[in-house]
Amino acid sequence: MADNVHFTGRLGLESRDSGTLSSAVSAVVDSLEDFGHPADKIEARAENTAKLQCDHYLVTVRLRRVPLRRASKLTSGMLQPAALLELSLAPLYPEHCDQEISELLLAEMLRRLLPAVEATSVEWLDTDIALTCDQFLGVFEPEHRQPAEPAAAPAPAALPAQQAEPARPRGRDCFTPVEETAQELEAHCDLAFQAAKDRQARAGASEAAVRARARVRNPLPATSLQPGWGSQLRASFLAAISLSGTRRMRFISHLILLAALILFLDSAGMVQAARPLVP
């Protein structure tokens, strides 16, 4: 989108009144605020021009005379206006501007300007044809237009159906209240945080399981203990058996019983407890 994009509409006025510009600026300010673009700054450097700046647009309201050499856009039966009220929207960020939304905003502001000023015609964008006020308003509420031919009276059964139709939302009613949006956003954030905590917990549990399986598959080697009394006695017993003959079997049997007793005492810890008492 080009940098010089602007959306312009004009209202033909019956007279050039000094209070027309202030009434038009008030209507434009209310429209911007109702549609979520409150005016941040208002400048009126000239008597016939006012500029309003909001977050996305620079709005210019100008009361001007009708040019003498202006090409006629009026259809038959329309009076020549005495002055023009020009309304122009210039996007502050043309590359991020939505054309349809900008045109709808301009049309709504023109619709709200009609009751505030004495308008005779409406010029929409750069078209070559001017519309009457009824034609322009009929675009917004076609069901309220006067038909060209009298229509037949509706049947009694159709009246409740027509009355039951809900009214279309306008202005701020088109947007969800901030309180409801904040609650939904807070609930969404809570779910996201809880999901992140669950993922971290599952990741920690999986790492612990991997370490446990690794310990089961690769057990730690048993630490070598220093030989105590039991190991020495076992070595002596084995040496006695290997060196003794058949004549010493009785001595060996007693030695076996003694060794078993000492092994039992060593396993129970009694030998280690009595070791400091031995000189």
Image (cartoon, rainbow, N blue to C red):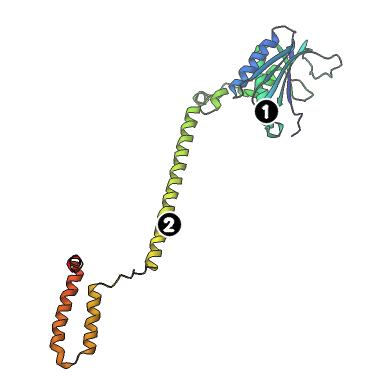
Q: Counting other residues with Cα less than 10 Å from the Cα at mark 2, is it few (<14), some (14-19), or many (20 or more)?
A: few
Rendered location of residue 250, percent (x, y): 12, 87
**Closer to the camera: disc 2 or disc 1?**
2
In the rendered image, the residue lying farthest to the front is 279
Q: Specify the amino acid type for callout 2.
A: Glu
Depicted 228 relative to depicted 12: above or below: below
Kind of residue at disc 1:
Ser
Q: In x, y percent, where is residue 184? A: 47, 34
Q: Is residue 148 visible?
A: no
Q: Bin the neighbour count of mark 1 within 10 Å (Cα to Cα): few under 14, some 14-19, many 20 and up.
A: some
75 left or right, relative to 227: right
- Answer left or right for 132 relative to 264: right
Q: Is residue 85 left or right of residue 198?
A: right
User: Which label number is shown at residue 207?
Assistant: 2
Residue position for label 1: 102
Q: Is residue 191 visible?
A: yes
